[in-house]
Image: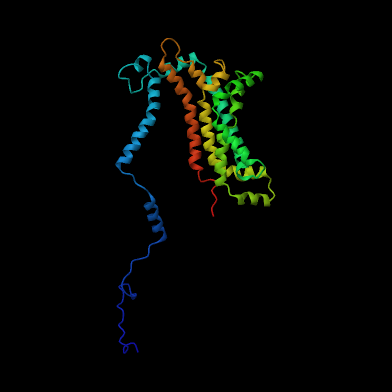
Amino acid sequence: MAGTTGTPVAPSHPTGRQSDGPSTPAPRTGRGRTRRSKHSRQLHGGPLVYVILGFATLLSVFPFYWSIVAATRSNADINHVPPPLTPGGNLLSNFDKALDEADIVQALINSTIVSATVAAGTVLCSTLAGFAFAKLRFRGRGILLGITVATMMIPPQLGLIPLFMIMAKLQWVNQLQAVILPTLVTAFGVFFMRQYLLEALPDELIEAGRVDGASYARIFWSIVVPIARPAMAVLGLLTFMTTWNDFFWPIIALSSSNPTVQVAINSLGGGYVHDQSIILAGTLLGTLPVLVVFGLLGRQIVGGIMQGAVKG
C-alpha cells in the first residue's frame, strides 16, 4: 500500500497539478534561438568606424556637390577666394549658354543610343561567350580563352590608327556605328561572365535540360539567363557608364556636328578664359542620365543578387 511504503507524496502544485521535482527553466523555442543567432551575427561598429565612414562619404560626395554649386554660380564667383560653398541663382542661365554653345540635346541622344547599344551588345555577346567557355566542351577552348584574355594586355591606343583607317574605308567616320561596333564586345565582359557562370551555374541543370530534350539555345534562355541576371546587370551598368564617359575614341571618330556628350562638353567654355560655370553646367546635364541608369540598375543588382541561386 502507498501508506506503508514510506514513499513521500509530492506536494500539490497551486494549480492543482503535482510537480515532478525541482523546477527547470523552460526550453528555448526555435524562434528565440533564431532571433538571438541573427542578432549575434550582426556586427556593430564603434564611433571611430562611423567617423571614418562619414568622412569617406563626404570625400566621395563633395566633387559632385561642388559641380552643382559651380553650375549655379558665375565664373567670377567660382574664382573668388575663398570659393562659395552654397548654390547660387545662375543655373538656368548657365544651362541656356551651354545649350547655345554646343548641341547638348543631340549629344545626349547620341550618347544614349551608343551607350545603350554597346551595353546591350556587350551583355548579350559576353554572356553567350562566357557560357560557352565555362560549360561547353570544344576543341581549342583553352587557347581561345587565353587569346581573349591576352587582348586585355594590349594598350587600346595601339589600335587607333588601324581602326580609324578601317572606319574611313567603310565611310563610317562621323557616324555612330564607328563608335558602337569596335566596343560591341569586350574581353573583360567575356572573362567576367565566364568566371561567374563557372561558379553559379551547376552542371546538373545543363544535363537535366539536355535529358529533357532542350537545345543549347533553349538552355541558354531558360536556365543560363535567369542565373546570370545579377552579373549581367553589373556588366551592363559598368559598360554603360564606361561608354558614356568615353572621350578618346569618340573625339577621333566623330565631330562637333554629330557629337556624344563628352565631345560636346569639350567645346564648352571656349575663349581666352574658360568659363568654368558653363562647362560644369553642361557636365551636370551630361551626368543626370548616368545617375538615372545607376539608380535603376543598382536596384536590380541589389534585389537580384540571390536570383538564380540553387538550394540544395
Q: Left or right? Give the position of 50 relative to 205.
A: left
Residue 255 drawn at (x, y percent) = 56, 16
In the depicted structure, whether residue 5 falls above or below residue 302: below
Quarter of the image that includes the N terminus: bottom left
Give the number of marks: 0
Residue 128 appears in view? no
The x and y percentages for residue 260 are 54, 21
Q: Is residue 274 above or below residue 21?
A: above
Residue 111 appears in which quarter of the rendering? top right
Residue extending furthest toward the top: 272
The way the protein has been coloured in the rendering is rainbow
97 up-or-down from 19: above or below: above
- The answer to whether residue 286 is left or right of residue 62 is right
Q: Position of residue 212 (x, y in %)?
A: 68, 51
- Would residue 96 be found to the left or right of residue 196 on screen? left
Confirm whether residue 2 shows in the render: yes
Rendered residue at 50%/32% (across/down): 293
Q: Quadrant of the C terminus?
A: bottom right
Residue name at image x 61 percent, y 50 percent: 203
State the image coordinates of residue 229 (x, y, percent, origin top left).
55, 41
User: Would residue 60 appear left or right of 141 to someone viewing this image?
Assistant: left
